[in-house]
Amino acid sequence: MARVVVDVMPKPEILDPQGQAVANALPRLGFEGITSVRQGKHFELEVADDVDDATLAKIAETFLANPVIEDWVVRRVDA
Amino acid sequence: MKIGVITFPGTLDDTDAQRAARYVDAEAVALWHADADLHGVDAVIVPGGFSYGDYLRAGAIARFAPVMRSVVEAAGKGMPVLGICNGFQILCEAGLLPGAMLRNAGLHFVCRDQWLRVENNTTAWSSRYEQGAEIIVPVKNMDGRYTASQATLDELEGEGRVVFRYVGVNPNGSCNDIAGITSANGRIVGLMPHPEHAIDALTGPSDDGLGMFYSALDAVVTA
Amino acid sequence: MTSTQVHIDTVARAEASPDQPQPYRELGLKDDEYQKIREILGRRPTEAELAMYSVMWSEHCSYKSSKVHFRHFKENTTEEMRSKMLAGIGENAGVVDIGDGWAVTFKVESHNHPSYVEPYQGAATGVGGIVRDIMAMGARPLAVLDPLRFGPADAPDTRRVLPGIVAGVGGYGNCLGLPNIGGEVVFDESYAGNPLVNAACVGAMRVEDLHLAHASGTGNKVILFGARTGLDGIGGVSVLASETFSGEEGGTGRKKLPAVQVGDPFTEKVLIECCLELFGERIVVGIQDLGGAGLSCATSELASAGDGGMRVWLERVPLRAEGMTPAEVLSSESQERMCAVVRPEDVPAFMRVCQKWDVIATEIGEVTDGDHLVITWHDEVVVDVPPRTVAHEGPEYHRPIARPADQDALQADVPDSLPRPSTPDELRETILRMIASPNLASRKWVTDQYDRYVRGGTVLAQPSDSGMIRIDEETGRGVALATDCNGRFCKLDPYTGAQLALAEAYRNVAVSGATPLAVSDCLNFGSPEDPAVMWQFEQAIRGIAEGCRELGIPVTGGNVSFYNQTGTTAILPTPVIAVLGVIDDVRRRIPTGIGAEAGETLLLLGETRDEFGGSEWANVVHGHLGGLPPKVDLAREKLLADVLLAGSRDGMVSAAHDLSDGGLAQALVEACLLGETGARVFVDGDPFVQLFSESAGRVLVAVPRTEELRFTDMCTARGLPWSKVGVVDPESESLEIQDVATIGLAELRTAWEGTLPALFD
């Protein structure tokens, strides 16, 4: 078994209301110097050894992310 | 008798909570999230909606609003506080009530007329109901699945601090069918269903929700 | 970010390089349209001007194929019909006077194509857009409704599209705090690659607060407020961007920008409250929402509706992305933005209100005494145009019209020979099969995802025939709104089909106890370049216009959506009709469910004929579409509405339910299940025809037994056919149809409510 992490983020040009709301709240709470926040999703998959990278890429592209509005990164994490 | 209703950016059911207060002949006082004090009100409602879009977590940003400092302080002195839906989430985030809300079990927003059982009629917001009474009130939320550690749940159940429980259908997968809970002193109540939308059978499923607002009148008078 | 210096195409440069080739075809402009722009300007357009003209002259913004047919509305609107209208076609939304000093505005718009690409965001931004249209009239938005159409319910792609669209409608509307009070969910093969997402909104204001999109008064300031402007929805215009980055044609990624806009309902909610506070302070001279075509549209429309002159400093627009060109800033469809015209002395007060709501507001321009819209980018003139030529004087086409070659064959393919159920067992089985079919099954799975309670004014919502909201808490005055269309009827005969849609929406408003007052429409059709589609369109528009004249209610506005097709096949012609009605006191609304009072008689108003062309029975049981739709009799619909109004006023009617898709059987099942009560029913004549015919002009009413004689006497006196079809039986747990079937309410409920959850959960 291996652990695979998939991070999905809104594409840079896509509006991210969630991140924006957090960014706007920070100065009100007294935290200065944060110029931008973007909020995405983090998936951790426990994967059998015979699942290849192509399959993982397909899972990310066709299911975990919506390529129209999101970018994603798939990486294997050493246990 | 003045009932304050807080408006945060993104609050939606504030005018409805004000209307409910007027229905029981209380004076409804609009409180703004940036207000430094509570304008002399006798009780506070933190109403429903999507404060700050609920974008980080429901209630997570609102609880830091200036007015919430005054609410926490007043609650500490026994002022009746009611959190409805998003307001319940805010009270949990603010630490006035234990637990937290997760996304509904069905993963959808759920809007339905919901039966509740009154499990504790000794709080500031439930004294007008008969113990065990069943009432029908709308529930409408995305993140309404009440959850808490087993120890907290045991404590709430052991001390009779579950005020309202879902009957029939559990609309969101809440632990122990919990719809609403109270603080140890019974002055603070939070619930996911919307009593302010059950004040007139014309615009809601019943007028069963009025009891909560009448109860607050009693609580203030006898305090 | 690229370090390439973006060169800006200015008016001076355009004059100096008249022969520079421009990608106008890629932007959707035809050769002659491009030539016309050159004639208007006396030179080639700059890139920014080209972006403006191309988007404003698109079918979506200019109505170039449909405009010539709007004369039917004008020609069929009498003075009397016009008298209740405070604003009509051409404004952001129609406005009608409902009495007590209240004005109500409503509109339906399509967001079909974006919703197919990205169902959640497409639907969400559709709701956002229609709400801003209502705000732009100076009104507080009060409720939304969403007529939706999908491919076959069991098609795999419908499983992708429907849940996303429903979640988007709900996600945006719920977070925005507007109750969703009605709409439709319809399935048909023809929508498989082209779902229809229509969004309707209704709002109210005091009559004196009506705001029209005007930019008059030289020296007045133009303020852009709301969200920042980003690269949303400018896929088309990025043709220009890619050419601007010289030597980078291979792609910086900018070329293939998604045309998807992301909605931010929280920002829109704050924007609504901010706008209403600004209206309350009476410091807004004119206001315009930014929708499709963004600033191109807002600036040219505001200027041309005012005195004509406007100066804009485009670099002042707050941006979300780096390196945007003037053409991109003008074309961006970033959501949750509004543009206001404000007197200079009121600007500080305007800014204070925006600051209170944390809304970004920027003075981007001012009204000038010229007749040109001049836009600069860092002191260089990038746009210098007569604004009317952009906003209103676009091309106008007389597209060829031809009755489809197969229309006769379609109409000749009558359903008369289709095998019909006749034995009690067959009829029972047909009832259960029909109520569980996707088009007739309960919409609860969808509508339970919408907040129908927020704002505390919802008196009726789905599954009632129309939505109803209270406008005035003191007097109880309110409005009812219903949207309807049967695309199958429209396919068989678009003129009659459109009138049937009008009749159904009108009837749905009347069964709630309200008086129908005004009409809006959302005309969804295939390609206007197909003469057969244009024939359907012309027939439908004439049907609506002439029908409205007969009913005496005006069309106050509308929306046209062309190019809706799955592959090369056009969708069913789908002119969605919204009818708005007024009720002086919502406390006398008529509910849909029976059994509210002890002892009710069930009456069927209207006449039932053997009419199965385009019926849901022919569709569900035989997959058949042919013949002619049911007859429409608008004088009868008017009479029916009058009788229902009188019945409601005098407390003679305790429940009423419109008969439409699925006929009497469907209406009976719904009335029983919604009222949670049983009934005993008797049908005269051929039970199949009585139960399943879709003849128009019929309503099932429940009247208290004490009022039965008074009510039926009134019907007889007014010449409205009626028949007694049964009694409500609160003791009974079943719907008993004599000599046909007795079916328990639980079995009916399982069949009716089980379908959508089984398909989509």
Image: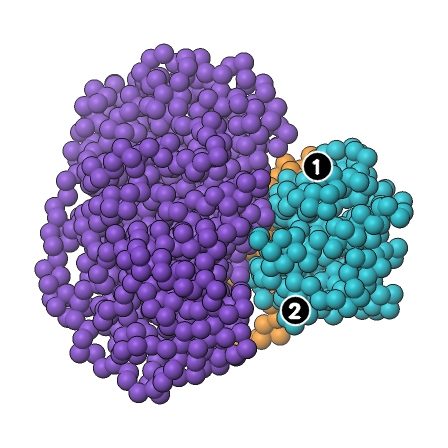
Left or right, residue B33 beside residue C38: right
Name above or below for residue C46 compared with residue A79.
above
Image location of residue C530, percent across then percent down:
16, 51
Foreground pick, B46 / C106: C106
Foreground pick, C165 / B124: B124
On whether disc 2 and disc 1 are found on a single subunit, the reply is: yes
For the residues labelled 2 and 1, the Cα–Cα distance comes to 33 Å
The number of numbered badges drawn on the structure is 2
Amino acid at dot 1? Ala
Name above or below for residue C533 compared with residue C232.
below
Amino acid at dot 2? Asn
Image location of residue A9, percent across then percent down:
55, 51
Q: Residues within 10 Å of mark 2 (few under 14, many from 20)?
A: some
Mark nearer the viewer, 2 or 1: 1
- The residue shown at (30%, 21%) is C385
Left or right, residue C466 beside residue C77: right
Q: Is residue B63 visible?
A: no
Image location of residue C54, percent across then percent down:
28, 35
- The residue shown at (39%, 14%) is C368
- The residue shown at (68%, 58%) is B208
The chain painted orange is: A
Left or right, residue C577 beside residue C367: left
Q: Which residue is mark 2?
A: B170
Label located before the other in sequence (2 or 1)? 1
Q: What color was chain B assigned in the picture? A: cyan
Foreground pick, C86 / C327: C86
The chain painted purple is: C
Q: Which residue is mark 1?
A: B30
Image location of residue C610, percent across then percent down:
22, 71
Tag shown at residue C423: none
Does dot 1 land on a helix, a strand or a loop? strand
